[in-house]
Amino acid sequence: MIRTLLRDPLAHFLLAGAAIWGALALIGDPVDPASRTIELSRERQAGIALGFERMMGRPPTDAEMDAAIARWVREEVLYREALRLGIDQGDAVVRRRLATKMDELAGAEAEVVRPTDAVLDEWLADNAERYAEGRAVSFAQAFFPSEKTARDARGGLAPPRGTAISLPRSVDAMELAEVEAVFGREFASGLSALSADETWQGPVRSGFGWHLVRLDRRTAGSVPALDEIRERVEADWRSTTIAERRQRAYEVLRAAYTVEVE
Amino acid sequence: MMRTALYATVAVWLLGACSMGPGEPTEDQRGDGTDTIELAEFPDRPYWGDTHLHTDISVDAFGFGVRLGAEEALKFARGDKVTATTGMEAQLDRPLDFLVISDHSDAMGATRRLYDAPRMLVRDPTLRRWYDMMHESPEQSTRAVAELITAAANDEIPEALRDPARQAAATRELWDTHLAMLDRYNRPGEFTAFAGFEWTLMPDGNNLHRVVMFRDGSVKTGQVVPFPGLDTTPEQLWDYMEAYEANTGGRVLAIPHNSNLSNGMMFDLVGPDGGAMGADYARRRARYEPVVEATQIKGDSETHPFLSPNDEFAAFGVAGWELGNLPLTRRSTPEMYAGSYVRSALLRGLTLEQQMGVNPYAFGLIGSTDSHTALATGDEDNFFGKHTGSEPRAQRALAAQNLGTREGRFGWHYLAGGYAAAWARGNTRAEIFDAFMRREVYATTGPRMALRLFAGFDFVEDDWDGDWVRTGYTRGVPMGGDLEDSGRAPVFLISALKDPDGANLDRVQVIKGWVDANGQAQERVYDVAWSDMDGERRRVGGKVPAVGDTVVRREATYENSIGAAELRATWRDPDYRAGQRAFYYVRAIEIPTPSWVLFDARRFGFDLPPEVVEANVIQERAYSSPVWLRPRRGPGDAPRIMDEG
């Protein structure tokens, strides 16, 4: 149980939150909006300089640094006064922004973390169907406008003639998604009932009519090794994980609330 | 207090997170797809896509309520299930192969920014009013956008929304994020994500909009930002496109759409200053606008019964839209129609070419959705509406439209939207874009029928017995191509194969347009193949009888007991005259089926007026790009435009 908990990203999230909270409580609060003293620590100054550098691609000159600090101070003054006036209360936009930040916080760890191979392997195994390649079939087909003409043409190893139609007479290792696009879903699912041998089977129904089919080969398809598709798997894992974490973080918080609707 | 510190910490944390970004795309995903997959020898199947889709950074779409962005749009198009803005699960029946997200370049992201801005900072009284309306209710928000569109039409957009410097900075940031997202979803061989935008020029409300579509990945497209439509001209758009190609080595094209709402301005006979059209203007137009969107949610622009009185299928998707321009601030009069519909534009192109040696309107045809929901739905039984306010709900078919309802446009006038089909050798940016450039593309009103057209001089009936596709490519030209007059009548190999999961075909027609000996433009519709043509369904008085109708109105069902799975024709032009300038395109028509309005009535259980029911038993169709027959060039003739392509 403890082990599971230790691996649980949500637990990480809550622990990290608690740690920050605790640390802040210990240090005391350095930025008190009610205070009229603005302290510009060295860390803050470094942060301002870094912000400038990110934007301009070079460090600020002294004059630029002074101006950047003045801008920061101005913003801080107005920010504190805004809090003093309670402008943050009851403002729909502020409310939504803060809620969004909470959401982002919940997903933030998943944005940066480099998942281990084990994590991605597990994801790949759970979602194998999404990544399966080469689920393909090789077959020949003859088309008939009616079920009766198709039945009458059966028998023997010789290829039945069929009626002309602009569909491939035979395909080699065509992926199933492609079979669906070209022959339609009804035909693609009809193939699953056939056995891979040299006989002409069917008729298989499609949106066009009926087909006699010789199924030469069916490739079960394989899931590529993680190495080959790591980027794709990682991107998918990330977007799903972020969404899951947000939802679960919300559910934990939500559980502590009672909503009363009049 | 403590909260402040916590959020500061979080903000720093997030800053760090952003620089890494999730899931970097590979080199193959970032490029144009050249040399990434194995290609077929000839284009072997149509690839299906939507070139016209809006998301939450379109100024109007956001105001209409959409909260889905590019990522959801891409996921949906490739077949994933997503949750629509109004809370329903949405999924395509079949995935698309490619997508162009075409958000409006003007004020890109502006309504989203306005909505998110602190109210005290919104100074402009008009903007503040829209701000309040957007926050008040979905209905009011939709009304605010209708006002915005009318303001754009009347050139009364508030200064704050049109300040170029401010827009450019905001657009840059959005565009870079957007391009990175497109690369991430671009998977050569599986799904192609194109960069694009909509250029929304609308003088007096007359729709001159174009979708701009890039061939390239973010390395090149990141060197520009979308070009604004307000206060610019088509020539300036082409300048922008020319500069893009010269500076990056990339390729870009523009697709005019909703000519049906242009009050005759989209395909004008004269130049932009009202004087004679110059050859340079015509040449550039043909060069940068090789394809036109002929059908979409806001109506069908193929032709109008006024222009084609002998065409019994000419009225599709015309009702409501024919009344006037986009916001219906100006009504249409019949003499405007010739400049508003594509068949007459193709005819005008022949006439102009005869006069000045260049055809500005030698374009191919595609369909698309123009959906403002981030959901590229084109199927009648899965229509998610023109915009978020018209996502599925009871009575939406009878509801007022945001544009021009008082004048007679209703919800049921919307079509379910069309798709673009591209004949390509593989599914990559380069292959599909190049199919657009050579016009080997076609339009459908939603169904995915496979339509082939080859033109040559020596095709024969027996060609069907062999590898006729190879024959078509080697002994003729495919749709979009040019034939030089050989002194003999052209022959066409035509095949229309039904949508494998859809309705049977009623008939296949060739539409020919030409300039006669007196210099008059003429058009004629030929039935060249139809179901049961050798059986019961013989011509009566020169006319092919109607195919029948199996639609059960109340159930919104039909049966494939009539019609054909495939229709083929080897067709020789019986009215050929040597030296004639002509175009030929194919129209494939399905048997009657229920439109989205009948599906809605069944799903939500409400009654429709009888005339609305009958108007919504429809015959969906595909329009091929034309093939042009051009007089043999004499030694002194000017070089022709297509030689450059």
Image (tube, coloured by chain):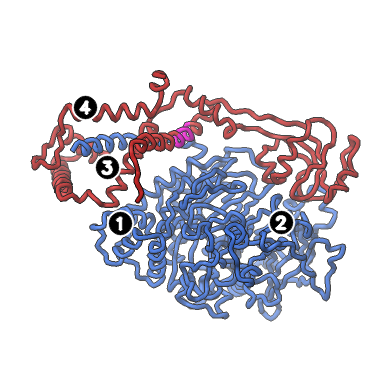
Chain colours: A red, B blue
Is B46 a magenta residue?
no
Marks 4/1: CA distance?
42 Å
Q: Mark 4 points at which residue?
A: A23
Of badges 1 and 2, the one in the foreground is 2
Label 1 sits on what residue type? Arg
Magenta segment: A234-240
Label 2 sits on what residue type? Ala
Q: Mark 2 points at which residue?
A: B503
Q: Where is residue B483 in the image (x, y as percent from the top left)?
A: 70, 62
The answer to whether the residues at label 3 and label 1 have Cβ atoms under 8 Å apart is no
Question: Split into 4 quadrants, where in the image is the C terminus of chain B?
Answer: bottom right
Q: Is residue B134 visible?
A: yes
Task: Identify the chain of the residue marked 1, using the numbered disc in the image.
Answer: B
Question: Quick check: do tags 3 and 4 share a chain?
Answer: yes
Marks 3/1: CA distance?
17 Å
Q: Position of residue B633 (x, y in %)?
A: 67, 66
The numbered mark, 3 or 4, whose residue comes first in the sequence reads 4
Q: Mark 3 points at which residue?
A: A55
Quarter where residue B115 is shown: bottom left
Label 2 neighbourhood size at 10 Å, few (<14), some (14-19), many (20+)? many
Marks 2/4: CA distance?
68 Å
Q: Which mark is residue B166?
A: 1
Q: Is residue B589 visible?
A: no
Task: For mark 2, give the secondary structure.
Answer: loop
